Image: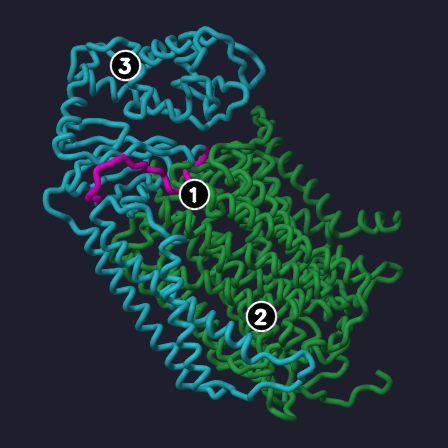
Chain colours: A cyan, B green
Amino acid sequence: MGRFRHFISVVILLIASTVGLRFLFEYIFALPIAASAEAGPIDTLFNGHYWMIAFLFSLIMVFMIYSVFVFRRQDDDETDGPHIHGNTKLEVGWTIIPLFVVLGFGVWGAVTLNEITRPKEGEMTVNVTGKQWIWNFSYPEQDNLGSGELVLPVGRTTVLKMNADDVIHSFWVPEFRVKQDLVPGRETTLRITPTQIGSYKLRCAEICGLNHTLMEADVRVVSDADFQAWVEEKSAAPAFAEMTPEQRGAFWASAEGFGCVACHSQDGTPGVGPTWKGLYSHEVELADGSTTTADDTYITTAIYDPNAQVVSGFNPNIMPQNYRDQFATREQEVESAEAIDLDIAADLIAFIKTLQ
Amino acid sequence: MLRTLKILLTSALTKGLVGQFVAWALGYGFIAGLRALRGMPTPWLYEPAVAFGAIVSFIGFLLAAGVLTDWLKWVVGKRTPLRHGTPEGKPEWSRYVNVDYNHKVIGIQYGISAILVLLVGGIFAIIFRIELAQPGMQWLTNDQFNTLFSAHGIVMIASILLGVGAMVNYLVPLMIGASDMAFPRLNAFSYWVSLPAVVLILAGMAVGGWDTGWVGYSTLSLRAPLGVVLFLLGFWINGFSSIASSINMLVTATTMRAKGMTLFRMPIVVWGAAAASIIQLTATQTVGVALTMTVAERVLGLNFFDPNGGGNPILYQHLFWFYSHPVVYVFVLPGLSIISELLPVYARKPLFGYRWVALSSFGIALVGFLVWAHHMFTSGMADVLRMPFMFSTMLVAVPTGVKFFSWVATIWEGKLPKNPPTPLLFVLGAISVFLIGGVTGPILGTIPTDLHLHDSYWIVGHFHATMFGGYIFPFFAALYYWYPKVSGHMYKERLGKIHFWLMLPAFWVMSIGQMSVGLLGMRRRVADYDPALGITTTQVLITLAALVIGWSVLIMVYNFISSARSQPVAETNPWRSRSPEWQIPSPVPEFNYDVPFEVVGEPYDYGLAGSVYTRNLAPAPSGD
């Protein structure tokens, strides 16, 4: 066979392999459903890349496997192959052409990035806070409404202004396609325009310590009317003064409050910190071997100075040591708005008492 | 038996480990003593004491093992002639557990250590892969899982650096016609210093582990358990090995080449090793800085990264990736050059575009320094910074493409054997696997698609493909290919083929499976996943594939051990290579070439009748 006929065979195989692989990618490289406007141009770019992956993989593999099978020698054949050193035109070609192809993809990427990050009309802002290992959202345009789930109106661009309290976290909802780290000490932003009403999961994508795996929050995309209804319902929550201490305690413990639940379970499941179930007025064994009773004094110390009496089997330095300040700030905020003399620690103890 | 035990117990290896332990205790005691003088109690596993002990411990290892003895003698003006060959009255194997200055001994020490450390890292992977097969936590806690994947990463990196050291140390002096490396004592230091580093990392797992991954991002590393300090220090100490061995390699290759070996007549492996060495020599320091800063922030209370004290956690990422991106080319460039070295031998055809292949290694090394921030596309950098890094990242594809095209052109019309021997199988497998890693790269380079893929399992699949294709498969190819040269015996071909045909399909399943689950929402470094993602079947497949890879590597280890005992003596040049190391007896004599050679032709001129690469300068002594 002459060189020309080898060439024709290879080109036919190459086309068949490229198309076949691209078809296969529909299954092995499937993407989740696209639920945001940003996902549109990104998925188009994915498609372009998939074709390029299928073509380049086929290009090398077809030539390689063809050579292995067509030009091979028998075991007793000790002759050498043709003495071909190289070909400068070919070398220049396979340097220049890929150069322009990858630069083309770079331009495509740049244009797409600009499209998905530029400010849009009618944007709404949501503040996102990540801390080990909970998410917290607040809606500055809805009277600083706080929430442990992210509820977004469909079709409206939301600017997420994100902060991390402790370590780096990362905001990723696969259906929205975009991702952004939350970095302590600086605010990062991400734009999302949900297009599909439905429920999704937000999960932290940057290793953030022990319970990184469990750091997730519900995301709901709802119609405009449902969003307004949700805001009203949330805002109509009773004032702190009207709640019982136990109700307030449950609120402080939740992700909307101080997120105690991220480490302290309420049903006895083991966690990073001791469970609250059956804690109050029971014996606690401490790391130094002594025992104490979990009364008001002990729990208050455990909140304000967590390293003072570490429970046996748990590690020091995991729980933040600034809850006295955090509580004081929050108490002042609430007290300036409502007629109430608030004691968050006492509320929490009241709540813990109910978990027997 | 008793004699074996005695030699082992009095070996530099044992002395070093004991020395490390003693020095660690002394360092710990020093800090505890200082505190006692001021009336302060020292709690068990008090971090500054553990950290200071760890720093002292690696010096203790080196002193006790005798790695520094010659240099210390020089200080007091004593002469230290180099000892050659096996010490009298000791078996030959005792050289490998003692400090020896011969480059081949050190190369084999590197190689065996690389395989042992590879097995340790592989066992970690298999333990947590079994956990990941099913949703829900089965037999690990989050804590153990985090420690295992973090240790898997850094232990495998240590293993790869050892394996690169094995190839460079054994092959480069042989290929350029030198009798040894330029600085034999520094060479031994480079190898031995990496052992206490590995000990520190493994010790870190025992004292609480750590949950930062191998990247050790701040501010997580500032809050992680005690183990992170030992991990950081082990990583840091390993840097000495990289820097010292790269200086040695560069000096050797520039000053000790045989007569007539111009730059463009060097074997391609020397090019790959040189490009890798330049990266190691110039980049390792920045990760050293990042690690030092983290340890100083944790132990001494300085403030670099914690924003509560005015620090910046992103600074760590810049310093870290300025080393840790280029270093992946340290891992793959020697491996890729193994592919380029072996293909012409088997295809009986010159390496296509030798100069382009040689220079593309330097092209990759150069571009590799300009792309580090693509690891930080989601970290919150301004777009004016993200964009240039996107374009520079895409450029890596160009010199990498040159290598692929040149390999394909080398075997086009080449005469590969109908029944391919194991090294050739691993080379062809390496090309297919590195190709998977290569073609799945640009999609990570363009930022919009990266925003979905970043920190997902797509990355895990992508970099495992680049590491297996660029290092593991070529390293195994090299082990099989040079095994007869190193041991004097041929490996068992049948077992080699079984190893390959188990490992290649299993790897494809594993890495493509990882990419597939990543697209569907599987995050990196998670101990568990939501069954609602619909990825459970793929996860089971990935775990099964990992188990097959693990078993296949054990087959290789068995093959090498049993072949050295039972296989017949190998021919001098079973592959009919033109390279000079195949023209001398196997195993290679103590001083490599009894007669120096000069280079009179091109290294890969297969198919040119009557041409040779090297010619002996003087007639060989009679009777040899």
Is there one chain holding both mark 1 and mark 3?
no
Local SS, label 2? helix
Mark 2 or mark 1, which has the lower sequence index? 2
Residue A240 can be seen, yes or no: yes
Side of B372 relative to B386 (left or right): right
Local SS, label 1? loop
Q: Quadrant of the C terminus of chain A?
A: top left
Name the kind of residue labelled 2 in the image: Ile
Q: Which residue is depicted at the point 25% across and 31% down?
A: A137
Residue neighbourhood size for the residue with mark 1, other residues' Cα within 10 Å, grouped as few (<14), some (14–19), many (≥20): many
Work out whether residue B539 or residue A117 is closer to the camera in this orientation and state it: B539
Q: Position of residue A120 (x, y in %)?
A: 13, 48
Q: Position of residue A98 (x, y in %)?
A: 35, 73
Please state the extent of the stretch shown in magenta in the rendering: A192-210
Where is B402 relative to A79, above or below?
Answer: above
Is there one chain holding both mark 3 and mark 2?
no
Work out whether residue A111 or residue B461 is closer to the camera in this orientation and state it: B461
Q: CA distance from mark 1 to mark 3?
A: 40 Å
Q: CA distance from mark 2 to mark 1?
A: 37 Å
* Tag 1 residue: B535
* Quarter of the view holding residue B607: bottom right
Query: Pointer 2 and pointer 1: residues touching (CB < 8 Å)?
Result: no
* Tag 3 residue: A248
* Tag 2 residue: B338
Q: Which residue is depicted at the point 16% across and 17% down?
A: A336
Residue B300 can be seen, yes or no: no
Say which chain tag 3 marks. Answer: A
- Residue B103 in the magenta stretch? The answer is no
Q: Nearer the viewer, mark 2 or mark 1?
A: 1
* Quarter of the view holding residue A126: top left
Name the kind of residue labelled 1 in the image: Ile
Q: Nearer the viewer, mark 3 or mark 2?
A: 2
